Each structure stands twice: as C-alpha cells, then as structure tokens.
C-alpha cells in the first residue's frame, strides 16, 4: 500500500533513550514500575475480571477510567465508548503545541457474554480468557499514567492515553477509526499496546476482510419436502469449493471459515443458514483476488444446490434460494518506513534495555493510522503470555517492568521531555 506523504512529524529528531534514562525525572518514572510491580499485577487482575465482549465494553471502560483518575489526566469517554485521557504537553508554539502522541490499548475481548473471566493461578501463571489480549495492555497504560504522575514528568507534546473499543473481530477497529477522526491532522504517532511480548514490533499492517454469507430458502420437512433446496447444503457446496482455492505463501495469504450457523432441528430443512469467514493477505492485490474467489465459490454453491432441486423435479417458483453477502469488516494494510523516527525510538529503547526485537506484520489497531500515512506501531506491555483467544489464555508477570520501561522510553523519545 502506498503511504501518504510524510508529515512534519516525520522530520522530528527523537531523544535517545540513553539520554532520557539519565534524567532524574525519567529515572524516577522507570523505577516506579519495579517498586509497584505487585500493584500493577493486582490492577491487571481487576481489569480482566470485568467482562468486555466486543460492543459491550462499557463496564470495563468505566473500570479503567476510575484507575486513571488521580493522575493529573483530563479524562472523558467519547460517544462510542473510548476512554480518552489527555496529558497536556508544555509546548506553546509551533507544531508541537497542537500535535499529540496516542498510546492505546483495546478494551474488548473475543469472548462472548457469560464467559467466566475469573483469574486463576497456575504456578507463576495467571490464567483467564483475555488475560494477555488485552488486559495486559490496559494494565500497561494504567501503570504508565501513574509512573508519569509520580515522577512529575512533563512532556513537550501532549500525550493521549486511550482505552479503546472495537479492536477484535467485528469491532472492525471502530475505536481507532474514531480516534483518527477526533485528532485528525494532529497525530504525530500512535503506539498500540497489545499483548505482552517485547520480542517483536508490529510495524507492518496485515490487510483483511471479514464476510458473512447467508442463504435463505423455503424450508420444510426433511422427509415430506425432500428435494427442496437446502441453505446449509448450498453453503456447504460453496465452502467445499472455496477451501480448494490455492493461495500464495509469498505474499502470505490465508483464509478461515470461523462460524457456521443455521437450522432449527435435525429433521427440518432450514429456512436460512450463514457462514462467517476471515480473509487475509500481505498483498492488497492477492486479497482482492481471494475476495473474488470466495464470492464466486459461494454463488456456485447456491447455483449447484438450485440445480440439484430442479433435477429432483422442482421448478424455481417458490423454491428459490437467496444469497446475501455482507462485509463485516475491512482492515486496511500499510507499512511503516524503515527509517521512521518511531522505529528509531523503539530501537533506541531496546538498545538501552539490552533487548533485540524483530519487525512483524499483523492486524492491530495500528492498521488504521498506518493506512493514513501516520507513523504507528503495536508492541507488547511486558511479561509473557500465551493461549491467546482461548479459554486457557495465560499471563506471567515476571519482568513485566522491562516492557513497561520500553514503552515509556519509546513514547518519551517521541513526545520529547521538558528541559
């Protein structure tokens, strides 16, 4: 994907992490993480135990808002549910006076309402759905807010800490989309805090499309009305055809049929049925080809089932299937230039902390700013995690402070610190 022209922000010179860490105020903020490790973990558990399915994030949003209070932030909740906490910068003139740096962690989880999110201990691990993705990110931005306040540290550019809605699945990155509208023309950089890992930096956005395909028909009794076109049969024919599509390994391209719904009983021809699919590719061109192949396969499935009904002696009058294709979400791609100041900032932090991270491509909240030509990355908040999107998701808080220091040094390098 072609990047938009570089803004003035692309020309900024970052403050090296070594120089930042030598400042007494920054050193106090960095030390705060280690001294308060137990409190951060306790906060992490509290956040996770507030359920937060996509489109139902309000209770967790209010919980995070409360945790951010008392840290000198100007906090509000916008109309779609994003918790926005601004920490005004000291710059009063020039571009710095109006620019902002966004540090965001998403509120929502992939788990439906009613999922037990109580945290259990398994040795050093804390086990619960969503514990790594992404209550760990929310705990990280909460810790950063308290560390900055405790150290009385002032940034030159306004820092905006956000707990945003709609990152997962059908949320379609709606929280980040709204933030880009709210701060249009003012965003210097975006850092999405997602998960735990500090071994990689997501600097390349993976494009994706999510679709729901539904088929409806006359329905009937499995015996008395045998021969009627069956929506589930039609979808099955289409899916079977689609999964035989060859996709390239370079550029990497993937597909997944993730949900199948429909029917009322085993002895009834269903009136309707639906499937949901996820299509992804490193190449926009390959993604478009995959979309076309998917739609063609599903139409062929309906046509084949309709033809089978005709072979059984039924005409199309009152026996016709209807196909509907609905786009559930579209995530744009985009790459951060290798010489971006934002990558320089995280590399400087890695060097200071003795870390070595690799660049990766993934689908995160960073997709939206990257697609707009705004420098953006996604990084973990520290510690270790695994089992993402499963009921056995886990998090190990050991050495979490290293990830928090990395996050703090990176954002301070980009915002600048008052001399």
Image (cartoon, helix red, strand yellow):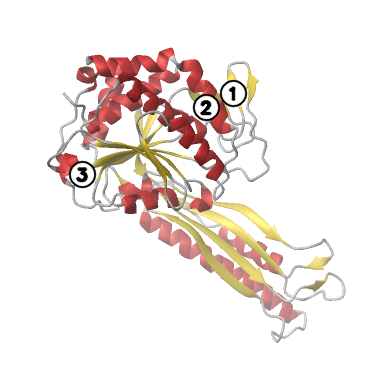
Instruction: Report whether residue 212 is seen.
Output: yes
Image-quadrant location for residue 415: top left
**Residue 180 as seen in the image, left or right of residue 254:** left
Query: In this figure, which residue is indicated by the disc labeled 2?
Result: 44
Could you say where residue 135 lies in the image, as x and y percent from the top left?
A: 51, 33
Query: Of the residues under marks 2 and 1, which one precedes in the sequence?
Result: 2
**Residue 368 marker:** none
Compared with residue 102, is residue 38 higher up or lower down, i.e. above or below?
Answer: above
Eyeballing the image, is 223 above or below 105? below
**Which quadrant of the figure has residue 122?**
top right
Query: Split into 4 quadrants, where in the image is the C terminus?
Result: top left
Left or right side of 94 for 100: right
Q: Mark 2–mark 1 contact, CB under 8 Å?
A: yes
**Mark sitting on residue 126:** 1
Closer to viewer: mark 1 or mark 3: 3
| Of callouts 2 and 3, the N-terminal one | 2
Residue at x 52% of width, y 57% of height? 245
| Cβ atoms at labels 1 and 3 below 8 Å apart | no
Q: Secondary structure at mark 3?
A: loop
Q: Could you tell whether 35 is left or right of 111 in the image?
A: left
Q: Secondary structure at mark 2?
A: helix
């Amino acid at each position: 994907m072609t990047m938009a022209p570089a803004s003035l922000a692309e020309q900024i010179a970052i403050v090296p992490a070594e120089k930042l860490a030598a400042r007494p105020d920054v050193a106090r903020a960095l030390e705060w993480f280690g001294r308060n490790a137990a409190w951060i973990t306790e906060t992490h558990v509290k956040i996770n135990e507030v359920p937060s399915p996509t489109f139902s994030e309000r209770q967790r949003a209010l919980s995070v808002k409360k945790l951010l209070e008392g840290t000198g932030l100007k906090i509000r909740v916008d109309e779609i549910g994003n918790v926005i906490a601004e920490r005004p910068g000291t710059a009063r003139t020039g571009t710095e006076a109006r620019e902002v740096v966004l540090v965001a962690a998403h509120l929502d989880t992939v788990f439906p309402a009613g999922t037990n999110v109580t945290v259990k201990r398994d040795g050093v691990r804390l086990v619960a759905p969503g514990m790594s993705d992404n209550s760990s990110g929310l705990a990280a931005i909460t810790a950063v807010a308290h560390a900055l306040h405790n150290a009385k540290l002032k940034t030159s550019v306004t820092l905006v800490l956000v707990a945003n809605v709609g990152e997962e699945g059908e949320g379609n990155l709606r929280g980040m989309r709204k933030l880009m509208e709210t701060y249009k023309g003012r965003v210097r950089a975006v850092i999405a805090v997602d998960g735990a890992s500090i071994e990689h930096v997501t600097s390349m956005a993976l494009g994706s499309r999510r679709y729901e395909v539904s088929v409806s028909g006359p329905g009937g009794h499995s015996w008395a009305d045998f021969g009627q076109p069956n929506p589930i049969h039609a979808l099955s024919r289409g899916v079977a055809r689609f999964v035989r599509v060859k996709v390239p390994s370079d550029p990497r391209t993937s597909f997944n049929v993730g949900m199948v719904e429909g029917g009322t009983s085993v002895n009834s021809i269903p009136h309707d049925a639906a499937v949901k699919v996820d299509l992804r590719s490193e190449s926009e061109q390959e993604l478009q080809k995959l979309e076309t192949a998917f739609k063609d396969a599903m139409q062929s499935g309906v046509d084949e089932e309709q033809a089978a009904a005709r072979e059984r002696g039924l005409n199309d009058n009152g026996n016709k299937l209807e196909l509907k294709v609905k786009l559930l979400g579209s995530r744009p791609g985009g790459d951060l230039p290798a010489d971006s100041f934002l990558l320089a900032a995280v590399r400087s932090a890695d060097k200071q902390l003795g870390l070595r991270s690799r660049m990766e491509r993934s689908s995160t909240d960073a997709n939206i700013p990257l697609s707009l030509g705004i420098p953006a990355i996604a990084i973990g908040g520290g510690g270790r995690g695994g089992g993402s999107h499963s009921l056995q998701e886990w998090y190990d808080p050991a050495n979490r402070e290293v990830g928090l220091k990395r996050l703090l040094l990176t954002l301070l390098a980009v915002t600048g610190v008052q001399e």
